[in-house]
Amino acid sequence: MEKLNNPIYVTQPAMPPLDEFVDLMKQIWDNRILSNNGPFHKRFEQELADYLGVNYISLFANGTLALMTALQALRITGEVITTPYSFVATTHSLWWNNIKPVFADIEPKYLNLDPEKVEAAITPQTTAIMPVHVYGNPADVERLQQIADTYGLKLIYDAAHAFGVKIKDNSILNYGDLSVLSFHATKVFNTIEGGAIVCHDEKTKQRIDYLKNFGFAGETTVIAPGINAKMNEVQAAYGLLQLKYIDGNIAKRKSIAELYRQQLMNVPGIRCINDMQGVNHTYPYFPIFVDTKAYGKSRDELYEELKKHNIFGRRYFYPLISQFPSYRGLNSSKPENLPIATGITEEVICLPIYPELSMDLILSIIDNIKI
C-alpha cells in the first residue's frame, strides 16, 4: 500500500483568489463598517437567496447560533423529535433552549429520520420535529410534513449538509417551517464560520433578525431577549467570493464522488450511498460503510490503516449523539430503540473529498482501501 507524502484530510475549504479577497477587504476598510447589517451583509443576503432559490434568508455568525435562534423564533418548548445520527450541534441547540430531545431511529438507505419512527415517538409534550438532511440527501419531506400537519407540529430542518440541494428543481430549503444552513470551513460552501436561517415570510424574517441582534427593534427599543449572532462584513465578503466559484467546486466534488463509486462498487464489504433519484447533490462528505465480515477488517481497523498512510478520513457520525454522556440517560437513547443508527455508526467512514483533490491522490486513496 502506498504511503502518501503529505497528510490528506477528509475535507479542505475551497479558497477564493487572494487578490479578489484583498480587494474586498480594502473596500471594508474604506467603508469603516465592520458589522451590523453593512453593505456586504445586505448584498450577500440577497445574492445568496437568489442563488439558493429561496424568498427570505437571514445570515448568522455560525450554524449553531442559527439553530438556537430558529427554535426561539418559533417559540418551541417541550419535546422535539430528532435524529441521533448527526453532529452534536443539532441536539445541543435543543438543550440550550431547555427543550428535551427525543431520538428516533433512521432509515437504512439514506440514513435520515424514519418518518414511521417519528410518528411513533410523538407524545402530548411534542411540539416540533428537527430532521437532518444527512450527507445532503433530503429527508422524506412530504411524509414528515404530513405528520407535522396531522399533529400540529413545527418542522425545522438542519440543512447543514444541503447547500444548493434541489428536488426536481425546487430548493430543499423551501420545505418545512425553517431550514438552517452551516457555512463552516468544512462545508461545500463556507464563509470560514457562518450560517443562515431560511424562512418563507417577511414577518418571520423580521423576528429572526431581531433575535440575532440582541432583540433590538430600533436604537432604544428591545422587544425580545435576543443574542449576538450577526454575521460580520468580512464573513459576508468572503461568502460573496465563494458564490462566484461554487458551481465549479460542486462539479469537481461530484466527479470525485462518481470516481469513488465506480472504483469501490466491486470491493467486497464496502458500500456507498447511491444518488437519490431526482436530486442534485453537492457531496459535503463521501461516506462508505464497512461490513467487517465481508471486508476482512472492521471500520476502525480500516480507519487506522488509512491514517498510517497519511489518509485522514472521519467516522462521521460516530459516536451517535445519543451515546454521549450528556444524552445517553434519556429513554430514547437506548440502543435497542435505535438499531439502524447504532449499526451504521460502527460502519461509517467518510473519505476525503474537496475540489483540489487530484486524480493521483484519489486513486491512491482507493488503492489503500482495496484489499
Image: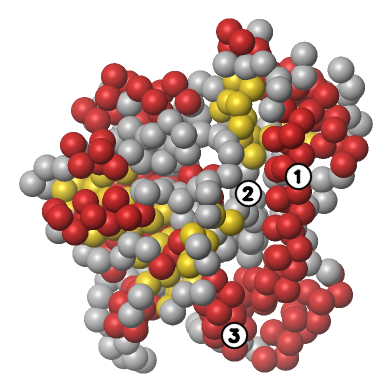
Residue at 21% over, 51% down:
147
Q: Nearer the viewer, residue 254 or 325?
A: 254
- Is 107 placed left or right of 257 in the picture? left
Please name the amino acid that badge 1 sits on: Ile
Q: Position of residue 349 (x, y in %)?
A: 61, 29
- Numbered tag placed on residue 205 in the rendering: none
- Numbered tag placed on residue 256 in the rendering: 1
Please tell me in which quadrant of the rendered image residue 361 appears: top right
- Is 362 placed left or right of 178 in the picture? right
| Residue neighbourhood size for the residue with mark 1, other residues' Cα within 10 Å, grouped as few (<14), some (14–19), many (≥20) | many
Residue at 76% over, 48% down:
255
Tell me the CA gap for discs 2 and 3.
27 Å
Q: Position of residue 240 (x, y in %)?
A: 67, 76
Q: Position of residue 53 (x, y in %)?
A: 51, 74
Please tell me in which quadrant of the rendered image residue 311 appears: top right
Along the polypeptide, which appears first: circle 2 or circle 1?
1
Give the label, 2 or 3, closer to the camera. 2
Asked if residue 103 is positioned above or below residue 276 in the image, the reply reads: above
Please name the amino acid that badge 2 sits on: Tyr
| Residue neighbourhood size for the residue with mark 3, other residues' Cα within 10 Å, grouped as few (<14), some (14–19), many (≥20) | some
Please name the amino acid that badge 3 sits on: Arg
Reading the image, the residue beneath label 2 is 283
Give the label, 3 or 1, closer to the camera. 1
Along the polypeptide, which appears first: circle 3 or circle 1?
3
Q: Position of residue 268 (x, y in %)?
A: 67, 16
Asked if residue 196 shows in the view, the reply is: no
Residue at 72% over, 50% down:
253
Asked if residue 337 shows in the view, the reply is: yes
Along the polypeptide, which appears first: circle 2 or circle 3?
3
- Numbered tag placed on residue 43 in the rendering: 3
Tell me the CA gap for discs 2 and 1.
9 Å
Q: Are marks 2 and 1 in contact (CB under 8 Å)?
A: yes
